[in-house]
Amino acid sequence: MPQISVRERLVDNAEDVFRRKGFTGASIQDVTEAAGVPKGSFYNHFRSKQDLAVEIVLRYARATDHSSLEGHGPALERLQRHLTAQVERIRGSGIEFGCLLGTLASDGANAGERVREAVREALDGWTDAMTATIADGQASGEITSAWSAAALAAFLLDLFEGAALRARTAADHTHFAEEMSIALEALRP
């Protein structure tokens, strides 16, 4: 069986460390201990904690499944499936720790410009994916055209991240899913 590289072990474990502790609270020592590698090995693969955080954000964004947004069927149903899957993704990795993007966004001032930019790009990509689905729904009359598709997608994503933050305080995802349903219902004309 092939061995996992030290770099992969660092990245695999760092996402959990950053989600649990935030950027500011997570130390390189925390990451290397979680990965089970010597602290000095970190610098063989990353110049800084910011470099590692950028790598984790890019990986998280690539792993976000947008496939349920594409295709046929009512746009609201596609959005519901997508958002439900994202709630489950967060629940599966610990609702009490929220969404990695929200966690790192809240540490933006301390994380540095490169991390903020990576989070911004990930959120923009996610917004763009939802924008296309909302535009489909607007074209079919299923979704209100009172606001642009991009504005409605940003609203949904902001609500999602806010609901994830609230869910962290109670370590409970039931209201999270309910809030997503309310938001989708509000998109109807």
Image (cartoon, rainbow, N blue to C red):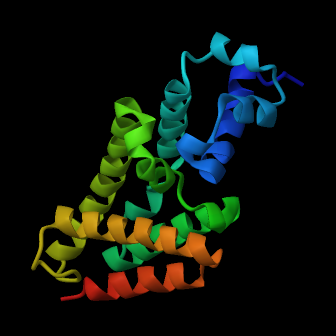
Rendered location of residue 170, percent (x, y): 62, 78
Image side of residue 135 versus residue 103, left or right = left
Rendered location of residue 72, percent (x, y): 36, 68
Seen in the picture, residue 156 relative to 132 is either above or below; the reply is: below
- For the image shown, how many numbered marks are present on the structure? 0
- In the image, what residue occupies the spot 49% across and 86% down? 178
- In the image, what residue occupies the spot 42% across and 70% down? 162
- In the image, what residue occupies the spot 58% across and 18% down? 46
If the image is split into quadrants, where does the N terminus sit?
top right
Residue lying furthest left in this view? 146
- Residue placed most toward the observer, 60 or 21: 21
Rendered location of residue 184, percent (x, y): 34, 82
Splitting the image into 4 quarters, where does residue 48 fall? top right
Image side of residue 146 versus residue 82, left or right = left
Splitting the image into 4 quarters, where does residue 75 fall? bottom left
If the image is split into quadrants, where does the C terminus sit?
bottom left
Q: Is residue 74 visible?
A: no
Seen in the picture, residue 67 relative to 63 is either above or below; the reply is: below
